[in-house]
Amino acid sequence: MSEKLLMKGNEALGEAAVRAGCRLYFAYPITPQSELPEYLSRRMPEVGGVFLQAESEVAAINMVYGASGAGARVMTSSSSPGISLKQEGLSYIAGAELPCVVVNMARGGPGLGSIQPSQSDYLQATKGGGHGDYRLIVLAPASVQEVVDLTILAFDLADKYRNPVMIMGDGLLGQMMEPVTFPDEVKKELPPKPWATTGWTKDRPKNIITSLELQPERLEEHNRHLQAKYAQIVREEIRWDEYLTGDAEVVVVAYGTVARIARSAVDAAREKGIKAGLFRPITLWPYPYDALGRLADAAKNFLTVEMNCGQMVEDVRLAVDGRRPVYFYGRSGGMVPTPEEVLAEIEKLA
Amino acid sequence: MQQEFIFAGFGGQGVLLMGQLIAYAALYEGKKVSWIPSYGPEMRGGTANCTVVVSDHEIGSPVVTRPSCVVAMNLPSLDKFEDRVKPGGVLVINSSMINREPRRTDVTVIKVPATATATELGNQRVANMVALGAVVEATRVVSVEGLLDTLRKKLPAHHQDLLPLNQKAVELGRSFVSQVV
Amino acid sequence: MKPVFTRPRSLADVSTHYCPGCTHGIVHRLIAEAIDELDIAERTIGVAPVGCAVLAYNYFNVDFQEAAHGRAPAVATGIKRALPDRVVFTYQGDGDLASIGTAEIVHAANRGEAITVIYVNNAIYGMTGGQMAPTTLAGQKTTTSPFGRDVEVCGYPIRMAELLATLVAPRYIARVAVNSPAHIQQAKRAIKRAFEVQVNDHGFALVEVLSTCPTNWGLPPKKALAWLEENMIPYYPLGEFKVPKEAE
């Protein structure tokens, strides 16, 4: 590992992508993720890669489609309003089974909203967003180091499953500086992609990248294939983190930067003698339903904390399945909950 | 042991850099650190601030409601953040730009004529380094040597000639602190 | 016996889904001939649109990607940037390129993306059943302009070749028609030129091809060819609007 650097989340993500072998990046500027295109506009030329500022988020995601279909490791990034524009492309990419990484440094909504951090794109990211039956793998880092680690993982998962992977951060994570280390070696050997459109030299069947299937029987077959793939991802790729949950009576559930805030609140609660713990989903899809549900055996109740008006709490309720009360505390519009606010909610439940 | 800082001032006073220098110096001394800026339109000409956490252990929340130290480089920053200093904490104010007395009596107030001192040194832009000298002297969050080492590492090659000026600014800043908190 | 007329190697030996009398088949053939003559089939990647040519990927013996509606120039950009030594072309209709995909075509052209765009303009939406296109002529009746296109309400038909020719970066922009043997010969030269420009000059090239839609125009194929001549060409003049500098 290299020496520890102090980097913003956005810039660390860009460097991690380069280290993961990503050589094409297409994006459109939007706050609070513009450090990422700015960083890659300097970095990509150094490694012989392509940085291209697209005319829109719509164009950027379709450039990703083309480059991914041509076999490249490719990424785009944006923040909430721009991610809405990418939904069409994401549906096509998922349908055509193209690997790529899409970053959402989310900000307050709906509409133009604000430029301050938010988690109000949770449902869009995990339950669809675009049309059709498809899933994104959604990774939610909570520190700048985890941004690096999960970005590298995202490229590997995308290639392994031929599926788009979203890195779900927020404005705070993108702007925050923390120490990071990067793996020394830049990955060079990428997995073979015999399906890519690289020019037909008659040594394989002609490759066609498409999400179109006009025959209902065949489209249903394709959907069954996708669902089987998603089932495999659910079996093999669920990730989460637990903190002091062993004897916890109040289990706080939070992801991303909010989990950091909640962790401080849990520490403060413990100092007051309250048995609090933290459950932090790292994959938002697939969601760690079983691991969270198991905590219902011992916990008295659950407190979901989000930077939105209540989105992930629906998954927490599914996981707990009515066995214990599930409470919600949220701030929205770009407001960030404080450890003191979360502690006050924990104290109400203790 | 954990210390939390908010550095606040006008855009252009170098408050984001103050936070970064503390974060880097602490990182080099083996501490855990986090740095978050205010961002958005207020960066341009309005007030800017950043929050820095320095800790011996894994940092939970990088968002801090009650910092152990607030550095206010101008009056709006004092108005905004004075009430948030943790009781028993440190409030460093740039007395060159702030013409009122702090209201808080439960914190250690350190008045540093940062802008005036920097002007006397011939470069108003080192006011942030004067204030930083006071911060390090009062909180011992990092060693003075550590801070100066960090400066040396972070000043770009073509600005290394500014190192003595910055060193002098830090030293003068320290002299305004009569007690270590 | 020496064959005098054969199927181009790059044109797949399958029946197309196009309506009787539709000129898409001619345009497909001209593209395939150009690819064969330049011997670039094994490094060519096509991008199909949404519209009547949505299944174009079945009709060429080259690798293909199917794009979302209007996004073919962005998809082609992604392919070309990933594989700069390949030849990339899009095949788009007037709804795809001149309506929903205007941002993508304008900016791909403006960047000078080294791609070849074959833009088929038949003044109507064919695939969805004959609705008004941005290229529908003033007064032309369609299923969504039943009283004829009212330019006071809908504006005037858009001339994409001329519009794109105002940009600095594109190297070659031409308009041709496929309604007569002479025009088809011209179209062939223009399409081949548009591939040559990509291969040799690494520049953006677009050929607008005036085409017929007998089904949705409500005309027999032969009358459709005449209608194109009498109504479309006066408004959409044929010619080269931009040619590589050295050839000027």
Image: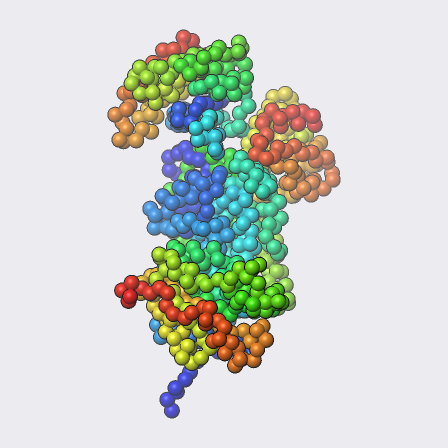
- Residue under the image location 59 percent in, 35 percent down: A333
State the count of labels. Answer: 0
What percent of the width, then of the height, locates residue B101? 48, 10
Q: Quadrant of residue C182?
A: bottom left
**In this rendering, would C78 be left or right of A126?**
left
- Residue under the image location 34 percent in, 26 percent down: B150
Q: Nearer the viewer, residue C177 or A54?
A: C177
What percent of the width, then of the height, locates residue B45? 43, 28
Residue A273 in view here: yes
Q: Quadrant of the C terminus of chain A?
A: top right
Please, is residue A184 above or below residue C145 in the view?
above
Q: Nearer the viewer, residue A289 or A64?
A: A64
What percent of the width, then of the height, locates residue A151? 47, 44
Residue A168 in view here: no
- Residue under the image location 36 percent in, 19 percent down: B127
Q: Quadrant of the N terminus of chain A?
A: top left
**In this rendering, would A316 be left or right of C186?**
right
**Which colour style is shown?**
rainbow
- Residue under the image location 39 percent in, 49 percent down: A51
Please, is residue A276 above or below residue A95 in the view?
above
What percent of the width, then of the height, locates residue C169? 35, 57
Check the image and name the residue furthest to the front.
C152
Please, is residue A264 above or below residue C131 in the view?
above
Q: Nearer the viewer, residue A81 or A268?
A: A81
Q: Quadrant of residue B147?
A: top left
Please, is residue A315 above or below residue C147 in the view?
above
Check the image and name the residue furthest to the bottom.
C1
